[in-house]
Amino acid sequence: MIIKINLNNISKELLISPDDTLLDVLRKTGCLSVKKGCESSSCGVCTVLLDGTPILSCSYLAAKADGHSVTTVEGIAEQAREIGEFIAAQGADQCGFCLPSLIISTYYLKNTIGNPTLKDIKQVLQANLCRCSGYESQEAAVARYLGVKI
Amino acid sequence: MMRIKEYLKPENLDKAYTALKASPNNEIIAGALFIRLTSKEINTAIDLSECGLRFINEHKDRVEVGAMTSYLDIIQSDCFDTPVLKTVKDALSEIMGIAFQNMATVGGTIYPAYPFSDLITVLMPLNCWVKLYKKDPVRLSEFIEKKQDGREILEKIIILKGSGKNAFRSFRKTSQDFSVLNLSVAVEHGDCKIAVGARPSVAQYAKSAMQFISGGKVNESIIEKTAEIACQEISFFSDIKASQQYRKHICNVLLKDALREVFV
Amino acid sequence: MKQVRLSVPKIDSSGLAMGKAAYVDDLAPQNTLIVKILRSPYSYAKVQKIDTSVAENVEGVVCVLTKKDFPRKIFTRAGQGEPEPSPYDKFALDDYVRYIGDEVAVVAAHDEKIAEAALKLIKVEYEKFESINDFEKAYESKVVIHPEEEAHPTFDIGYDAKKNLAASYNMSTDDVEKELSRSQIIVHSTYYTQAQAHVMMEPHACATYFDYQGRLTVLSTTQTPFHVRRILSRVLEYPMHKIRVIKPRIGGGFGGKQAIHGEVYCAAVTIKTGLPAKLVYTRREVFQATYTRHPMRIDVTIGAGKNGIINAIDFKILSDTGAYGEHALTVLMVAGSKVLPLYNKASAVSFDGKVVYTNNTPAGAYRGYGAVQGNFALESAVDELAQKLGMDPVEIRKINMIKQGETSPIFRIMGEGREGTDTIINSCKLDYCISRGMELIRWKEKYPCRKISANKVRSVGMAIAMQGSAIANYDMASAAIKLNDDGFFNLTIGATDLGTGSDTILAQIAADELEVPTEKIIVYSSDTDLTPFDKGAYASSTTYASGNAVKKAAEKIKESIMAKAAEYFKCGISQIKYCEGVVYGPDNRQITLKELSTIIYYSGSQEQIYSCASYVPTVSPPPYMAGFVEVETDLLTGKVEVIEYVAVVDCGTPINPNLAKVQVEGALVQGIGMALYEQVIKSRSGKLLSDSMMTYHIPSRKDIGKITVEFAESYEPSGPFGAKSVGEIGIDTPPAAIANAIFNGTGKRIRKLPITPEDIIFFKEKHE
């Protein structure tokens, strides 16, 4: 079947199977920032924005996205670069596999919560799991990016 | 992995219902969160996203929530800021993270009566009804007692407004886990309802305990006895997350705490 | 300008943040065949019959491989140097399947759906056998897991397959029984540690294809590309000079990618069909069919005087290596060799360990590598000793622990699979680690505990630890540096960056030596064709061994540059000075690297300036640390929360302070996971029940408290710029520190991992 989505501000018509996940379709379309980690909605590395709000693309049918807008890191390159610099400044970007999803969630956090606190950071990013960094440096980076004092 | 031959997004419930009835291998798709975990083969998947079921409507005596309303919709809704409904909002806020809450739907949780569901447990002690399409509303407690066959569509839930207090408690081993046990209590005019879920089975009323504590004066000793009775009558089981013994223990601890909150 | 001790951002930072193609699945050729593996549903069985005809005829299926399609070559999957200290006990495909998940057949098809459908159509008849899933019943059981005559060790590792013994080892420094009889106080306890899963974020993946020279290229998420090349050549009987293994960026390893996994099957498909193939493990397969940490039972006996001085230690270990014996002996030995030397005042130390085969998911390398299991046992036992003596647990460590300038006979006796190396500890700031850690956590205020409400108590606990830096007289690392016109350098290294940032810190070492900014060192790593040999990322060897190789290579190329400059200035080399990328000659003459390199490439004294150096460590200087934890225990629910974890680490010079700190923080959280949350759960028949991230939980950011890491900067003379390793040490202390804190808060001594709320609520005192 054919679906029409607005992918990173570009209208795209995509040929998919009804049981394709959005994750697989996005990666086939060239959005390599979206990763496959657990296939059970548990780890967060597949996080993308659907109409501006996070979803887990490994557990979201591509067919459902028909008529909607999808944002990946490829679509917010400038902000991703900026957040990435804050992360790099803390050494928090270890293997990098969870990094794009962390950036997507941080971008969402910035756009939805004015004057966030450290508690907000932990709350919004709680489902973005990381096995390398121990979280401390990630939060220091995101806090600095958002101008939150810790 | 689930296999789907055809995908339909009907523009209203009637069309969705007709499509569902057209074949026993056709199925309703709500949030489709656990899609990767099953290996079903579906003929036509019927997505309810465009059937107008994503709503929270407040009426004078009740709040109606459409089946395609997400947990996040509820968490962000002003309608759920009343003392009783805030308990529901708070319970949902503890579940996993934003992306999960954005995808999980009311209908997608209640129709299959997921046993670990915090939503079902927190709604049980309230005056909550389930409306299936083309059927009369049924109490939530009755609805989850029967195993559904996938041949009906959950349209909305109806929460009748009341006075009184309620509380919800759950125990998780890690923040991203499902509840090892959850429970909820509500009291209105001395009448108390207690529901215990994730036992690991789905929520169940603690009827004898409810009878014991309802109507009379409540003090710490009554609360302790109530919890004791509840833990005797509720059936708990062991699974990968916890033993039967521990669930019973934690039920006792959490129930006393919840009862203290509503009977203050 | 110094580049070492600088928190330089990782060189791959912006690329990974922006989602650039970097990982195996990103870089695999388009339109590869998709490879899927049929796995055994039984713990122990024999394949009587296998019928692939229906599967083969499915449209889109290109081939189905079974045992007959592989040479009959037994090997070990362990990512270790040859001859491996792990038994050769695995065939690529065999008639026998020895755990639920063991490989039975391989399907290659044009897409994932077809491959999965084909798997279901392979008909297998199994003859089921009784299986052993309880490791305490495995030794000398009548059920023998490796009866095949081909299975063998490469040298004596205490192997006896008839008794289900994959490896065994024992040693004794002195008459421990005699010393124990003199002890005035004895602690004797048994500890159990669990199987822990790595849960690196990127599942194992490989892609194989023939390049334009007809050579087999293997892209793999491996920590050991050179071992993979050698093993593939052996197992598939394919000439090694026709194999190239490349490790691109990988999404974490922690030891879980230090073995050969799907590469054998994927390569076999490409060899057979001539077509590119890709095998990406599902998360379920990673849980089921890669490997876990070795679960262990450790019986500890400590003898001491009333003054608290330990005079004897005995360790008896039973380790479960599962269906195959990779890393069996070495993990067992590290459980002793990287733990016992902490208390070098004990003159009598004995160690007796057995590693048994079972029909469980195999165990293998995992950060800490035995040291964390041994540490849990020893550091819990030392606290038990302190408690018996009425001593402060910090005090008892201070009077017993190893100090700078000292040694321990264990260094000489126990290595990692072989004998060890006599070592004088030239850098050890354990004393500072302890005092600073106490300060940071406010130990004196908080020890042992404070009740903060009717049901909640906060308490503190601590532990010390050591690890190693590479394996002495065994590991080999090399580096090559090339000077380019314009005055920048290419650094090629075999060393494997799993996300640790080793590419970056190795560039910093070269840059510091060459006195240029780090950005002038362009790193390329882990490609068996283009980079010199490195044994790979394990045993915490990269900073120390690969770092020393890089430093040597940089020193060599600096000399070559100076020699070229001498030629250019027509003077003797003694008149040449090199400083910050500028070469100074006699009579105030000078030339920049940029100018000199342009000349020697194009106009005069032309020559490619290039260096290569190797390094084999002669000692393995241990990093040390002290870990302090404050926990809050809810006495009603049994839930234990980590409020704060303080770690003070002596890793010599931290080459990149940020990256070193994050390595420790990450390791601490894995250790907290091991202490409180993580458990591989099986049914009694060996079926894995915790086979997804919904049932196996690693800590999220809400499951840990505040983490504080500081460094005690010692200086290790044998390390590059004074550095030791930092990759593993961080994971060693949390299990014991947390168990000790829980005891201090509740009086409950729990001797198994993980420590769950149920353990606290249903605690029964065990009497000795």
Image: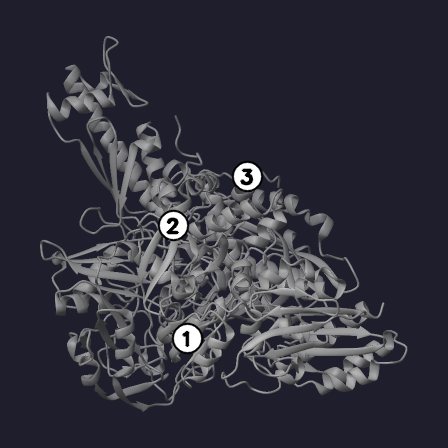
At label 2, the amino acid type is Gly
Tag 2 and tag 1, C-beta contact below 8 Å: no
Q: Name the secondary structure under disc 1.
A: strand
| Both marks 3 and 2 on one chain | no
Side (left or right) of C79 relative to C762: left
At label 3, the amino acid type is Arg
Q: Would you place residue B96 above or below residue C16 in this image?
A: below
Q: Mark 1 lies on which chain?
A: B
Q: Which color scheme does this rendered protein use?
A: one colour
Quarter residue C12 falls in: top left
Q: Which chain carries label 2?
A: C
C232 or B3: nearer the viewer: B3
Q: Name the secondary structure under disc 2.
A: loop
Q: Nearer the viewer, mark 1 or mark 3?
A: 1
Quarter residue C115 falls in: bottom left
**Numbered label attached to residue C303:** none
Q: Nearer the viewer, mark 2 or mark 1?
A: 1
- Residue denoted by label 3: A144
* Residue C373, horizontal then vertical, whole percent: 49, 64
Side (left or right) of A48 relative to C585: right
Quarter residue C492 falls in: top left
- Residue denoted by label 1: B45
Q: Which chain carries label 3?
A: A
B111 or C638: nearer the viewer: B111
Residue found at x 56% / y 50%: C626
Q: Distance between the residues labelled 1 and 3?
A: 45 Å
C482 or B100: nearer the viewer: B100
- Residue denoted by label 2: C499
Residue found at x 83% / y 76%: B223
At label 1, the amino acid type is Ala
Question: Alpha-carbon neighbours of circle 3 within 10 Å: few (<14), some, or many (≥20)?
Answer: some
